Image (spheres, grey):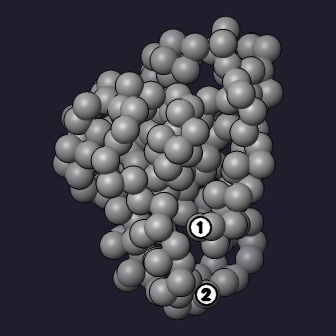
Amino acid sequence: MAKRVIYIHGFNSSQKSYKAVRFGELMANYDVDYCVPNLNHEPLQAIIELEQLLTPDTVLLGSSLGGFFATYLSQRYQIPAVVINPAVAPYNLLQSLLGPNYNPYQDYHYDLNNSHIEALKLLAVDKLAHPELLYLLQQTGDEVLNFQHAVKYYSQCKQLIEFGGDHSYVEFERTFASIVDFLKIT
């Protein structure tokens, strides 16, 4: 039974993301500690921050880059996780964003550099050792990430593939019951 639910936001996002807030509203009906940390832009620092929040009864929910982090944590610590339109290889996608960046949700400027890309490569899970711990929620209309990469990578995991939608995961609320069921939130 889950007692701590950690929502992991995506790249240049925050605890104020729509899905984080909406899922938090649902979690108010459950006896759980719902956490949504504002993550550092440095991948290894973000992982350290997340690892410090883990308890033996933690479950994870991650979106986009947060899905990448949730996959890493799930497989390393054998924690159930739901990944929403996850980044499978963010080190490839973020190459085009090297240089000055601004996170409008956390209101700070930073430089994305090759050390961030290399750190993401270190966190990549080549083969899922515990696919039963992961649940993929994927919409084919994702305009940021190629949905086929996620469908293939998570092929041994439980999956909900929806045609259409976009990177934000349109009508995310419809998935609440299946997320709660998979993560065994009571």
**Horizontal side, residue 77 vs residue 144: left or right:** right
Q: For mark 1, what is the residue?
A: 43
Q: Quadrant of residue 49?
A: bottom right
Q: Specify which label sits upstream in the sequence, 2 or 1.
A: 1
Q: Which of the two residues, 162 or 61, is positioned nearer the viewer here?
A: 61
Depth-wise, is mark 2 or mark 1 nearer the camera?
1
Task: Work out whether 129 lies above or below 141.
Answer: above
Q: Quadrant of residue 110?
A: bottom right
Task: Work out whether 30 lies above or below 166.
Answer: above
Q: Residue at x 74, y 21 (%)?
A: 3
Q: Residue at x 40, y 48 (%)?
A: 86
Q: Position of residue 152 (x, y in %)?
A: 20, 44
Q: Which of the two residues, 152 or 74, is positioned nearer the viewer here?
A: 74
Q: CA distance from mark 2 to mark 1?
A: 13 Å
**Horizontal side, residue 177 vs residue 103: left or right:** left
- Check the image and name the residue furthest to the bottom: 99
Please state which amino acid type lies under the numbered disc 1. Answer: Pro
Q: Position of residue 99 (x, y in %)?
A: 52, 90
- Quarter of the N terminus within the rendering: top right
Q: For mark 2, what is the residue?
A: 111
- Please indicate, yes or no, whether residue 47 appears anywhere in the rendered image: yes
Please state which amino acid type lies under the numbered disc 2. Answer: Asp
